Amino acid sequence: MTPAGFEQDTQAGGNPDAAGIGRKAVSLAILSLLAVALALTVTLLVFAAYQYRSQVIAEAEHRSIAITRLLEEHAAKTLSMHAATLSQMEWMVDDLGWERIDSSPLLHERLKAMASQPPEVLSYWVIDDGGRIRASSFEWPLRPLDASDREYFRALKTPGVKPGGSIHIGPRLSGKMRGEIFFTISRRMELPDHQFQGVAQISLRPNYFADFYRSVLHGSRDVILLMREDGEVLVRNPLNGPPDRIEIGHFPDLITTPDKDGFFRAVTPLDGIERIMTRRKIPDMPVYVLYGTDVASIEKSWRDRVLPYALFAIPALGLLCLLGVIALRRSRQAAEAQEALSRANAALEDRIAERTCHLDRALADKEMLLRDIHHRVKNNLQVILSLLELQAQRAPELEAPFSEALTRINTMGLIHEQIYRSTGVSAIRLDNFVEALAGHLNSFHSRPGRTIVIRHRVEPVSLDLNRVVPFALILNEVVSNAFKHAFADRCSGTIDIAVTAYDGSLHLTVEDDGTGALEPEGACVPDRRSMGMDLIRAFTRQIRGEYRFTRDGGTRFDLVFPQQDGDDA
């Protein structure tokens, strides 16, 4: 250390206020950096959680819409078909007349044949204007039965029903003859003067609809409802009760609640579960279908997606805090060590021998630090390499230009790795380095069904750091060029690398037995310039060398350059 430097250390060590201010500044910088890193990590986690929540809700909404449309189509086709059948039944009554219906089983046989076909039909019924059942698909002769107390009969008989008849959907009922649960679709029958003639009615099995709804349910806590426009539930799946219950719910709020974009949230009264509901009305029918998606299941799906990120982020935050504490402690320790060193330098001016011993020890630490720096540079280059590979995978069109950059970055990383592994930090053994670079290039350019062998004969000579980087990048470009062009239409080949020392110069030879690279020099045709050839020219000038390409069956590259830099010589 020079006397001037010693004087500066003495002044720094003698000013404790300045040293304390420096320590506070370093601590504040580290704390600020740690706070920014923590805030950024938490922000990214919250943003990702919000994005996933929106995505999960959108998926549930789209799925509910699709299922509801399917339910609407199924109900519309089924009920419309039976509405048409009711018109046919009215025509049969008009054609036969009540006297013939009472005296002949003809209408019964027709209704019985019709009831045997659709699985959802329980029975067909014809009721006159007084409520007496005149014909059915169950039996003939028909026992005396009265339907005047049924809701569908009272509703269709009421004056004011629009001329031409109308369709009525009745509630769930229990049959008077067999006791089976059903709901009705019925039509008002009229005489030519629009006078009430009676009712044509079809009894439908709710179980048929429930079986179909069971097949389209997505979640175990989702629900499907077939409801009248007054809120009376006709079919519900899951039923969560005995199948022979007549009343299974009356929820007018689910019909009247306004929706937004086809959705509304509601706590379903049948089980008290909050759901996202979709609702669609059956065209030309006083019936609605509703599908409810359990909000708790949506939340669970969202948590399941976010959980892996949270499990990664929480330890990462803890590790970040730990690293920040370690860095803060190290910075303070380093500042205190610097102060102690400054004070020691001021106190040990008269002990030159001991000071020399300290300097030797510091020199060894610096050499270790340099190797550690090269190791960290190599690790950072590997991170950059991984990021570029990820980017190339996401954008296939970048794979080709990225591949050349990846090999160059990896070559520089190999240089820093060789420096880290070597005993010194000022030069690299070329034989070890060329062997490592050849292995990397062979692995990087390997393709299924193609075998390219790299052979190398390198003398155990060392090259200083200022010259090994240009040398390594030249070698990387030449070998990569051979892989890309020399064996384009072949599945096997050999690349020979040789480095020899002669009379203060190094001679690099790279030779392949391929078809020869197209325009290897690049300078022969001015319009054809490549980045690889530009790099070879620039790095050759940097190490004061000369190169040439020759082709005779394969391609040969020769490079001659001084082993020692001219300034050093």
Image: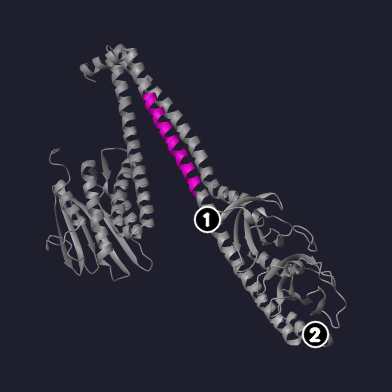
Label 2 element class: helix
- The secondary structure that dominates the magenta segment is helix
Q: Left or right: 428 with respect to 566?
A: right
| Residue at the spot of label 1 | 261
Looking at the image, can residue 545 be seen?
Answer: yes
| Residue at the spot of label 2 | 101
Nearer the observer, 412 or 259: 259
Q: Left or right: 203 with respect to 456?
A: right
Looking at the image, can residue 137 be seen?
Answer: no
Name which residue type carries label 2.
Answer: Ile
Q: Left or right: 10 with respect to 72?
A: left
* x and y percentages locating residue 17 in the rendered image: 34, 13
Residue 294's label in the rendered image is none
Name which residue type carries label 1.
Answer: Asp
Task: Answer with mark 1 or mark 2, whichever residue precedes in sequence.
Answer: 2
Above or below residue 189? Residue 250 is above
Residue 513, by quadrant, is bottom left
Residue 9, by quadrant, is top left
State how many labels appear. 2
* x and y percentages locating residue 99 in the rendered image: 81, 86
* x and y percentages locating residue 421 in the rendered image: 35, 42
Label 1 element class: loop
Q: Are marks 1 and 2 in contact (CB under 8 Å)?
A: no
